[in-house]
Amino acid sequence: MSGWGGISSSEMAAIDENAEWLGVPRILLMENAGACVARVVYQWLGGVAGAKITVVCGTGNNGGDGFAAARHLAGLGADVTVILIGDPDRIRTLEARTNFEAVKTMRESIKLFIVRDMEDLERVRHVIEGSEVVVDAIFGTGVRGRIAEPWRSAIQLINSLRALKVAVDIPSGLNPDTGEAEDVCVNADVTVTFHRPKLGLPAAADHCGELIIAPIGIPPEAEIVMGPGNLRQALRMMRDHVGEIVLLEPLPDEAIKLISMLGAEPKIGESREGYVVYAGRKIDLLKDLKGGYSWAMVLGMTSGPRLISIIGEKEASRLGINMNMELRGRYEAYSRRASELENIVYIMGRSLDLLLGDSKWRLGWAGRPLNDQGLNTLIATTLALLARGVNGFDAASAAGYLAGIATGSGYDAAISELRRIMED
């Protein structure tokens, strides 16, 4: 990690998925998150033995973190109550359900209540009001807009207490990317955010209280690899409007199929304003277009805005880009080089690929070096995502992941993986 800068909720979701792809399952990350929350409560109170602690959970992964925290707090001797707001049958992920089922079995050390409506909330009001600590694990990074009942009244009840209020990752009701509360929001005394602070937290100090950044075992590679999380993130960025793709150099039928899967259709011919252009090695043709394209991809190095250049290691070395560096050196060198570039550069290497641009960088090492199938998959997927409104860096990063699959297992495997994530 080069620093502790803010991160968007979509970036965090991609990192979580990449971590699992790299061998660190989400259930382990949730376990670590719960342990971190319990540790913070322990430190704030100077011990939790006998302390009345209520963990208020939702049905998402934020609630899953809360279930894990409750288990750890019970193990430390606290008097723990878990209140699930919502239908247990709607707990959304395997990880959260696993932790909920564990809490259910702890009949002696944890009291469990289910709140489905306002009447249920009134029945447990005295439990919440009698707490020394309330852990807020209702909503995570996905909350937007007005909050429905009984969740809305639960947040207002939490805010009315004099108890220590600890928010899990972000205070429930807060937009993690803007720091704005569109409706009600928990006013926490302390917020335990995981891995890195979410973008909006610095602007939401009144809601967050003291901000604690808790590492939960995510490998640094999860942020810099071109992985499945980046493909999913790019698919979620796609707009309904589809720009046209013009091929000044042809692509094989298998690559055209990938473009079609993503809702775009390429044409052969001259480019007009607003088109996504693939010029291949015919870089000189770009001069005649006079910048009328929305994006252009080329094989070879050129410069200018809205350009993606795919080059090899030899060209990279002539640009002063060293592909053989240790991780600590990469952070400084690649970040600096990425901030200097006017366009986006994708370097195909012998053992790994390097993507630079928009002051960011990523690596791809699975299925490297890329063969012709991998290169064509890289080109086709990037073009299609650009036509669907995805920015160049994120489009190339997503395509770099699929390219490794195509190299290792062929076009059909890349198509199957794309279909899996699109339908998931």
Image: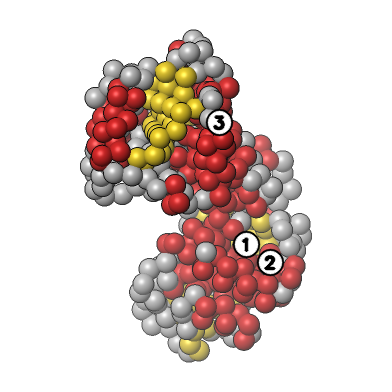
- Picture coordinates of residue 165, whole percent (x, y): 36, 24
Q: Residues within 10 Å of mark 3 (few under 14, many from 20)?
A: few
What residue is rendered at 49% in x and 75% in y?
A: 262
| Viewer-nearest residue: 297 or 341 | 297
- The answer to which quarter of the image holds residue 188 is top left
- Picture coordinates of residue 97, whole percent (x, y): 53, 46
The answer to whether 144 is drawn above or below residue 412 in the figure is: above
Q: Is residue 47 left or right of residue 255?
A: left
The residue singled out by tag 3 in the image is 106
- Picture coordinates of residue 207, whole percent (x, y): 30, 30
Residue 92 seen from this side: yes
The answer to whether 131 is drawn above or below residue 115 in the figure is: above
The numbered disc on residue 65 is: none
| Viewer-nearest residue: 148 or 168 | 148
Mark 3 is on which residue type? Answer: Met
The residue singled out by tag 2 in the image is 405
Give me the C-alpha separation between circle 2 and circle 3.
Answer: 44 Å
Q: Find the residue positioned furthest to the bottom.
A: 269
